[in-house]
Image: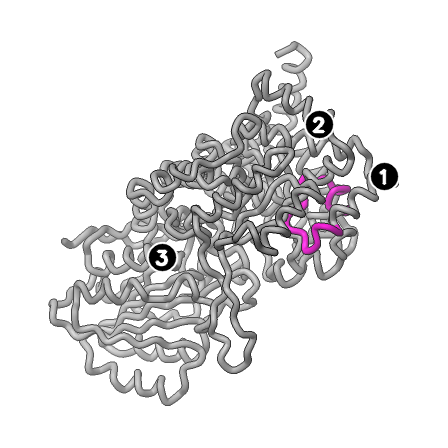
Amino acid sequence: MTRHAAASQWSTIVWMLVRCLATAACGLALCSFTVAQEPRALDRAAEKWVHDTIAKMSVEEKVGQMLVPSFQSDFMSSDSKEFDDLVRAVHEFKVGGFHVFGGTEAAPNVLLNPTYGTVTLGQPLEAASIVNRLQAIAPVPLLNTADFEAGVGFRIAGATAFPRLMAFGAARDERLAEEAGRVTGEEARAIGVHVNFAPVVDVNNNPRNPVINTRSYGQDPVMVGRLASAYIRGMQSAGVSATLKHFPGHGDTDVDSHLGLPIIKHPRTRLEQMELVPFRAGVAAGADAVMTAHIELPELDPAANTPTTLSAPIVQGLLRKELGFKGLIYTDSMGMAGVAAMYKPAEAAVRAVKAGNDVVLHSPDDEAAFKGIVEAVKSGEISLERIDGSVQRILRAKARAGLHRNRMVNLDQISAVVGSRRNLAVAQQVSERSLTLIKDTRGQVPLKLPADAQVLYLSVLDYPSGWRIAAPSRTFIPELRKRWPNVTSIELSDRTTAPELELVRAMAPRFDVVIASIFVRASSASGRMDLAEPLTRLLNGFARSNRPFVSVFFGNPYVPMFMPDLPAVMLTYDFYDLAEASAVKALAGEIPIGGRLPIELPGYAKVGEGIERAAAR
């Protein structure tokens, strides 16, 4: 390091220290997080490849590198319209990579009984096969992305699925976060994904947040930054780039950006104390990428109808200059209503590039986005220098992933890497250690029931549609019956009629215990996050009786606030089979309970609360 570079770096450190001290809630412990890491270095051969590749590129080829369309990981014949569309994106729009989704299936758009689910899990071998076929025809290696926030199994069947990030916040173990990152990275690389859009570093401090919720590690910005940094270390050690999202912080919104444009009106001082803390930590930990959010922050950019994605003062000013981030900047999906409802694809793409994003993700019209940016460059609206800066970062990311040497996936190795028992054991440990008992006024947990006890099990859903890949109670019921064979299971939802609810209420006294599993989502684009009032009334009624009654919450952890009389409340922060199996083990006393609440439930429970229970068997 030269004397000038050392002096410059020292000046930056001093400036950051002063800034931390000037911010009321930013202690000296955070200041060590504020110095940005340089991108991981390339060797001489990789640097030469980057230089030689960009030197040969036309304007169109450079612009194409900045576009990332998507595909579903269902079976796709090479002789199909779907595959032809992907080939066209490579040949005509020169795209720089693809976003790998799971699967989908068609469902009727009907009224009265809209219970069909459309989302399915993709297939690992098919995802890798599509990647290989596209890599084989791409002039420049493709840098592929995915949303594996909760592991590759979050999107791909047979892969390891981890609990949602809030479960990590409840487990409070950086080692487990790092291991989860490593496992996710290894499995992602095995199917041809090089950039994971994780970790979410939004600080979820709004109980009515309909889109982040359990996707966040929790409410404490320092804890969020610490766990995220561990996850980054693990994943990037496995050769997959980590992405901090959703910059500059989506945790205090009450509008889903899939459905509209959230507006955060906090002053800059508050953003420094809360939202920006984990982003600074993640940048210091060396995260390779950042994703910008479709949220409006008038205190940072007063221009109306300007989400962060399209804001130069936030992307270039705050993220690049102030935070010193030098890696790749991705937009969030440009098909979301937070942008798409205001701007046509071409204009949105041009605005995103002018704001400072390197990659325009998942445009609703890739052809329009491509042509719009090319025209803006040729007209001088966007400088070629601006494009070259992004393309260099993209090519360096590709070289860092080793794609200049080998871009293909070994299909024979996938079954040895993806979904192994070793990887599943890490996910299981997180799930079990995250379980949080926040209330047990009658000392009922673990359950003290004879093997022949009569159990009434209620599977209580927010609404019955959209559960295609996570059918509630499909694991809880058989696991419960292994311990107590005499189980009567009933599913309730907002579609349950008043006579049916009355029948359940009348039959309950015949049972030795009532166990209610409550499934409430705060999921993207649903616009819902509550339990129907008749169901809440039924559960509160059970709570007032002397009958043993235990409730387990899956998904939205804020729901217990609306049922303050429940005598026993355990949180899992998740859905799916692993969470259900862990909950039954805990109720049976087979594993200890030791999770701590990573969020505040206003008027109900504080951050850090949790009742510990030793294993009884």
Position of the N terminus by quadrant: top right
Question: For the view shown, which residue lies furthest in the right direction?
Answer: 379
Secondary structure at badge 2 equals helix
Magenta-drawn stretch contains 354: yes
- Magenta span covers which residues? 350-368
Determine the image quadrant of residue 416.
top left
The answer to whether the residues at label 2 and label 1 have Cβ atoms under 8 Å apart is: no
The answer to whether 422 is drawn above or below residue 609 in the figure is: above
Numbered badge on residue 253: none
Q: Tell me the mark number nearer the camera, choosing from 2 and 3.
A: 2
Element class at badge 1: helix
Q: Is residue 205 above or below residue 528?
A: above
Q: Which residue is the extreme one toward the bottom?
A: 499
On screen, residue 390 versus residue 143, left or right, reads right
Q: Residue at x 16, y 69 (%)?
A: 485
According to the picture, the residue beneath numbered tag 1 turns out to be: 378
**Residue toward you, 139 or 486:** 139
**Distance in Å between CA atoms under marks 2 and 3:** 49 Å
Residue that mark 2 sits on: 54
Q: In the rendered view, does 46 fall on the left or right side of 338?
A: left
Which of the marked residues, 1 or 3, is nearer the chain's N terminus?
1
Horizontally, is 413 left or right of 201 in the view?
A: left
Front position in the image: 507 or 411: 411
Tell me the CA gap for discs 1 and 3.
Answer: 54 Å
Q: Amino acid at mark 2?
A: Ile
Residue type at mark 1 is Lys
> Can you identify the residue that label 3 sits on?
572
As for residue 162 lying within the magenta part, the answer is: no
The image position of residue 270, as x and y in percent, is: 62, 46
